[in-house]
Image: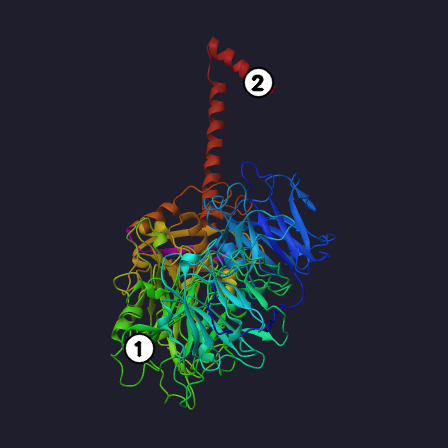
Amino acid sequence: MGVALVWVAGLVLVVTVAGDPCLIISEVNADNPKLDTTEFVELYHTSGQRAALDGYTLVFYNGNGNVAYKVMDLKGQSTDDRGFFLVGSVDMLPKPAIPLPPNTVQNGPDAIVLYRTSAARYSEKMNVTAAGLVDAVVYMTRRTGGAEVLAEVLTPGEPAHVEDEATLEGDESIERCLLSEDRWGFQVSSPSPGQRNNCTPPAAPPAGPVITELKLGGGQVDGFVELSEAPAAAPLALVVLDGRTDTVSVSVDVKTESSRNGLISTSIDKSFMKGDESGAVAVYSGRAADFPVGSALSQTQPLDAFVFAGPGSRPSANLTETLIPGRQPYQLSHSLREGGFYLSRCGVATWARDPGVFWEAPQTPEQPNQCPWPKICPHSILVPGGTDSPPHLPPWGSSDFLINELNTDTPGAAEDGEYIELWHPSGRRVSLQGVWILLFSAHNNRPYREISLSGHLTTSKGYFLLGSDRLVPAPSLRLPPNTIQNGPDAVALYRSPSGPPSTQGGIPTRGLLDAVVYRQRGSDWEAQELSKALTPGQLPLLEDPEVLPGDEALSRCRGLYPYDLSAFSVAPPTPLKENMCPRPPPVPEGVVISEVTSGYWTNHRQQRAFVELQGPAMTDLQGLVLTVFDEEHDGTVIAVPLSGSIDAHGFYVVGNVKEADQAFPGDSTVPARGAVVLCYDFFGVCRAGTALTNSSLRDVLVFSENQRLLSSLSTARGRHVLPALRSVGGGPVSLSRCSCCEPRSPSSWTSSSPTPGGTNLCPSAAFSSHIDLCLGPLPGDWQEQPGNCSAVIQGRGAAEVARYLEQRCRCGISALYLQGTNFSCVSGWLRVWGDIQALSDHQKTLIIQTSHMNPSSGQGDACSPPTTGRYTGTASTLGLQIGLIAAVLLLLGLGAALVAYFYRRRRPADYYTMELSEHAEGLSDL
């Protein structure tokens, strides 16, 4: 169909090759129908030639435990002459270079990783690591799911791929295909071991048709545009725009009823070609009459668009950012081709409006595109030999993207330094697939700009910058100057893989990751509706130009929780750098952790977790951060910048109890094993994996035996405290400070019943019982020289005695219970006597029972000579008295026996007596 359109063409498109060739994981087939006898892993060298594989290691990970189950050193191996290398089942065709027994490659959730560093670094049963990673694929099946941890470590920001057996009849595999420019991805297709992958562009996305093929005429032949068929019958308009004036050159209605094989072709008359000018072609919902020739660029968002730049001529920033936000126009070279130049949509990216999906390829009107096999390396390749990455995304606050810095009002009328900076808490390179930014106006509570970030990635430190095209450093997504309004307005961040968040209607909240509502002076209440929906219960922020000379920004300084405006401070702009936050206020003195309760320390379902602080009344807590570490997660699960002040009674409670002054965020709680830390300074100091200095660490309670945790928190001599459930008779248990107020001292703590916001329950003389023990040396604990206990009395005798008693009682005895107890050292033996305190009659009964228990062999409490046992239960003088009494009794018994003997010898006997005497004498002689 011949329709005259204005077209700029006849120029050669430059195809960029990213760096040197490299080795990639090209295809994985882990799950075959019936028996797994044709499974394989295909590697490919992007040079398309034979390449040695020395220095590479292939590691297979099991998602159940996230440990390696097979390691292959590829030393001595090489690809074939076309760049392919196969590892697979012994019976498959073509024959693999490394044959495997059937059913070796697990079906998922699992991962296969290519490393380039010393093979000695990797072994079976090792934990998953990103050190030395070159390429990776994380996969699963619809039945199993999972693989979240593997994906977080190996492919952050990208979910596990599904080898979906329902996609195709027979077998299928996960194949690597180029998404756009130098970004790779995976899709499910028919297996092609040792061959080019079956990478076909997707069908039309839900939003509408896309441009699938272009012909740029050289001035002597007609060009054409080919579109995919619309998913629903609706009018479509094809519009060509002038790149210099941002005006419509030609618009035409697309006749969807003439499609063949799901494709619609529109011819371009050669007489409208303009040589070396820049321009664009866009597809809109509507009719050509809505886009008259000569009219200005519409702000209506197109269904798809292609923007190109002629040599020495770039389209305007307004044209580029309106039609293809965040992406660059295709750059055409000076070379001309007779017959025109052909571009095909070959990238398999599911998003539209991206010139990066087009490659040079033969023209195939109304037929599937014939795409070449790319010779470029993955954009996200990591440097070989890199350091280990964290095993998980930080579990505190948010584990998804956050708004990190916002500069909406820059000096001067140009407003060409404004920007929005995002950050991913992993601090690593992460995909922004499915992420959107919406800029809201408070005048109508609707977005005035909606930007898809699909196809983009953060920097290697997790930052992503969008802003004015004159901003330094250059943003990844450029905006025309004065795009971001000064306020009252809002910036909201969404994860919405299915399409624009605005389709939800109203102010969308589903998929909301983070939001900042901001204002100018005198406009506090003009953004009430935005605040209510996006940041409930909070007033908009003021980017106050009077705080700093020159420019300023709203910077995240005090927390990683989303929608929390208290986390932001006015600070100097630092795009793509660590935020320059204000100095914290003076250190609040005398504040310590007073009580900690976990819901895991009781069988009562109603028990709630909390942390109680104690300090001088009305002390301002600003500058303090309360952090909770979890032994199981090996990191921080709660990090709360404190606000408010200590109450009039000297307490402040944080947690999930009704007495709390500040709540734990979300569903957070105190774990069964871990630590609670009170530190001072900005939020960045109190995070998982950070070595806390004495200047920042104010107090700590460790209820874990994890030595790494004890070491990182610098606790006194690596000591810890564990809750004793028996101490309170099976009810809720807390760890309470009962020795005020030495910070970071394990000996100050004991188990008791919870008292949030009140005086702690501590050992009392009202429940005391008497104790009198004579103890021998405990193995390696009491002394360095056997037989010498004097050091115990001078040092930590009470703590060691309490440990011994607690080992037998398991009822919460600590050194605090022995305040009324005396110690003495006699001949290397330690005597302990006096009163031992208790929390209650219940605990007193347990202590009495323990002190009267019959000791096991060799560990008695009754005093005895050192050669007969290690422990005795009385003083050595008492033992001497008992020995003297025993000797007297023995002498009396011997005298009685002699008297009886002589008496019988003198008395006459009868026949029976005489017979028995003879027998007795005979036995005596023998």
Residue located 40% across and 74% down the image? 558
The reply, left or right, for residue 594 in relation to residue 141 is left
Does the magenta stretch mainly form a helix, a strand or a loop? strand
Residue located 64% across and 39% down the image? 101
Amino acid residing under circle 1 = Pro
Residue labelled with disc 2: 923
Residue 258: x, y in percent? Answer: 43, 57
Residue 157: x, y in percent? Answer: 48, 61
Amino acid residing under circle 2 = Leu
Image vertical order of residue 127 relative to residue 343, above or below: above
Splitting the image into 4 quarters, where does residue 13 fall? Answer: bottom right
Image vertical order of residue 463 relative to residue 898, above or below: below
Residue labelled with disc 1: 540
Per the rendered image, the range of residues in magenta is: 824-841
Cα distance in 3D space between marks 1 and 2:
111 Å
Residue 714 visible, this orientation: no
Q: Is residue 488 magenta?
A: no
Count neighbours of disc 2 (C-alpha within 10 A) and say few if under 14, some if 14 to 19, many if 20 or more.
few
Residue 179: x, y in percent? Answer: 53, 61
Q: Nearer the viewer, residue 536 or 271?
A: 271
Residue located 54% across and 47% down the image? 866
Splitting the image into 4 quarters, where does residue 171 fall? Answer: top right
Image vertical order of residue 86 relative to residue 445, above or below: above
Q: Is residue 832 magenta?
A: yes
Q: Nearer the viewer, residue 353 or 33?
A: 353
The reply, left or right, for residue 55 in relation to residue 617 is right
Outermost right residue: 76
Residue 369: x, y in percent? Answer: 55, 57
